[in-house]
Image (tube, rainbow, N blue to C red):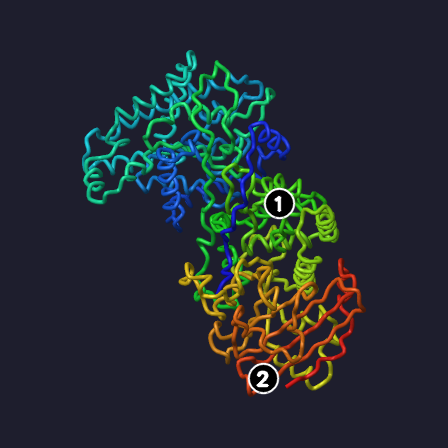
Amino acid sequence: MAGQPGLQDLSVVTPLSLTQTQHDELDQALPDTSSPTPKLPRDTDEILYDSFSSPYIGLAAISFYEYLKNNNIEFRTSSKSYYGKFCSIVQSSGTGKSRLIFELRKKGVLVLYMNLREISDRGFPNRDPVPARILTECTMDCTEAEYTARCYAFFTAIFQVLWWDLGSKIPALDSRDLDAAIKAWNDAMCDMHSEARTKFFEMVDLQYNMVLKSPRQSSVKQAFRDMVQAMPHIFAAREKRKRIEEERKDKYLFDEPKLVIAFDEAYPLNKLNSHGIRLSRILCSVINSYSHDNTPVWVVFASTTSQAADFPPPQVIQNSMRVVQSGNSSYPPYHALGWDQFATPLGDMPANDVAKFCHIVRFGRPLWISLMPNGGVLKLAGQKLCDSTAFDSMATNQALAVLAQRFALDFRFGHRDTVSYIKTAVASHLRVCFSTTENGLWSDTGYPSEPLLSCVAAILLHQSPDNLPNALHVLENRIHSGMVEIGQRGDSLTSRLLLLLAKDLFIRQNPPETAIQHLLYNGNEHAELLDCQKVSIVGFLEYLFGTAFWSDSEAGEEAKTVFQHAYINFSHWISMEEFISPADSDFEELASARCDPDEWTLRHWHRTSAVQCCPLQPLVDKMIPIYFDDPSLGPDLKRMSQIFISDKVGRISNIGDPGYDTTRTHYSIECQSDLPYITLLLDLNVDSDPQLSATYLKRDPSHPETGRCLRIYALRKGYKKFSLDRKKHWFPKPSGVQCAT
């Protein structure tokens, strides 16, 4: 079964060639993301500090290690001619960039971590005062020569102090104690509160001020060469590794990373100063000056924006810089930090309990579960999603972030505002980056299924009477401008808005007092989030179509009785890229990841997600999970069914026809079940009078696999907007629920 919820791999569009000038113009057009908000409360520092010592979950560190190894191979062997041994980790906030860097030490890599966040930012890991002061403070009026001198002196000091410090603590001989000594040095330097770390940067500061008196490119190259040559037991192959290489015939063994110099929270380097100089470009040109040695020493920039290490090399180099320019290629950023690392296993949480905060908080990025002991997670998530302490529903970026997270908004790459919006959304509004082209211009991004953030977005939309209309007005303007995709004639997006907002308003009519419905909630972790709670299908359909939807006829009462224990709980939409049940030939590489229809539906129930099918999916466009709360049916896996939705306009669809009874047995769906299901045919934006009809199909003895189905056909004229009045229904009074056997 395809369509597993979570982070998706998306195709990469063809890169465009940009000059340095074009990159600068694009960067200047982007909003300033150099001062991210909000700041973490002071009392979260110790909680996050402790979380860095908890067991690491996932394979991201192994994958990143291989990424660095492959980069070194490419640098030595590729015809592309890379500019320097630097690369970047680019992902939105809270996804584990800092922890990933620290985890490299467990692979035997020496890790020198430096955090460059601004002095006003109290986030964790804490700011490192010495490197942050040298590289980011008092730079607004720096000339190119002055900042180049700083970078020369800084890297010279780093390599010299590494030589002295490592040489004094790590044995010179290849012995059994070498790995233990490297581990001890790493553990001390990756402890943000350690005395050894403080002393190291004090030495760097002292040496930097001495070198700054006469900074030269030759000093950097010499310091790097001295460090590597003085410690061949660290930077060259050890004897035992030579023997392993001979046995394995692995010619790439020497490309395994030995030292990583990491600049985390590197966004201050993105600034353009008063002379039009971007600091990161000078910093990377200095890295270029010593990068021609084959030693696998890498500089890694970690940030929510790729600008720190995403640029073409300088096309004009002043004599004063004396920078070697050897290539014009850079490495694509690393994005694969993982998702759902802390999610509860499917069998460990009853379907009736999935709305509990302690369950929902485990989906998505690891930041939420890390902060749970401190409380205030919902408030912080809202501030990070909006990039503000309060939601401004009329601000375009905020409104689009809140809507896109829940309603799976798509943006047109050809639109003039899309590139800048996407970069800003990743940097400041928790949008996730899946892949990036080599020139850094285009990125595949989106909001993977993250139900906690969906609940936060729902609370923001409904916490004030004006928020939802204002946000929809922003969306309408972006649709009219051509920036937001709406599907064929607008039906795909319209129906997503219609169904989820109807559910939002329905559950807010009489919300349970114990449900979590405010961002300031800081109570019992077993309380349920309002927007993840199960909702009666009978009540929902009455709200959507009117109380007369269930007629007094025998068939209508029978259908109502059949679904009296049926519930939905979707809080957001997620998009699929495959058929619900793809052909084996299309899915061979992921065959082990397939699951049966019941498990597939239950997994979406557990994360409160509804599915927007891929554009080529036959018959249906959407799926909403149904759960039957009836113990007599057996375990949760045996209680799952579906609502299948078709947006009819512009496509051939006959799921609403009484004689069509094989919707879920179609080869592209294959969701056979003994439980009844619902098909909903929405005909929107058509030039016809409103219509609503429903037919309840009972089991056909000659086709037992088809089950029982409630088929609903709803037509609405000119359906581009719908009423937000909770007392009004979106469709006219039905003609009655008819029975067909």
Question: Which residue is nearer to you in this view: 595 or 454?
Answer: 595
Q: Residue at x 19, y 30 (%)?
A: 173
Q: Residue furthest top?
A: 213
Q: Is residue 565 above or below residue 686?
A: below
Real-space CA distance between mark 1 and mark 2, rounded to the nearest whole angstrom:
47 Å
Mark drawn on residue 205: none
Q: Residue furthest front?
A: 79
Q: Is residue 166 above or below residue 567?
A: above
Q: Disc 1 vs disc 2: which is toward the camera?
A: 1
Q: Amino acid at mark 2?
A: Arg
Q: Quadrant of residue 703?
A: bottom right
Kindly state the secondary structure of the residue where label 1 is placed: loop
Where is residue 279? Give x, y as percent: 52, 25
Q: Quadrant of residue 715?
A: bottom right
Where is residue 164? Give x, y as percent: 30, 23
Kindly state the secondary structure of the residue where label 2 is placed: loop
182 sits to left or right of 119: left
730 sits to left or right of 347: right
Question: Which residue is nearer to you in this view: 362 or 142?
Answer: 142
Q: Amino acid at mark 1?
A: Phe
Question: Which residue is nearer to you in this view: 494 or 18?
Answer: 18
136 sits to left or right of 507: left
* Quadrant into which the C terminus falls: bottom right
Where is residue 344? Give x, y as percent: 45, 60
Give the residue pinned by disc 1. 413
Q: Residue at x 54, y 17 (%)?
A: 143
Give the residue pinned by disc 2. 699
585 sits to left or right of 429: left
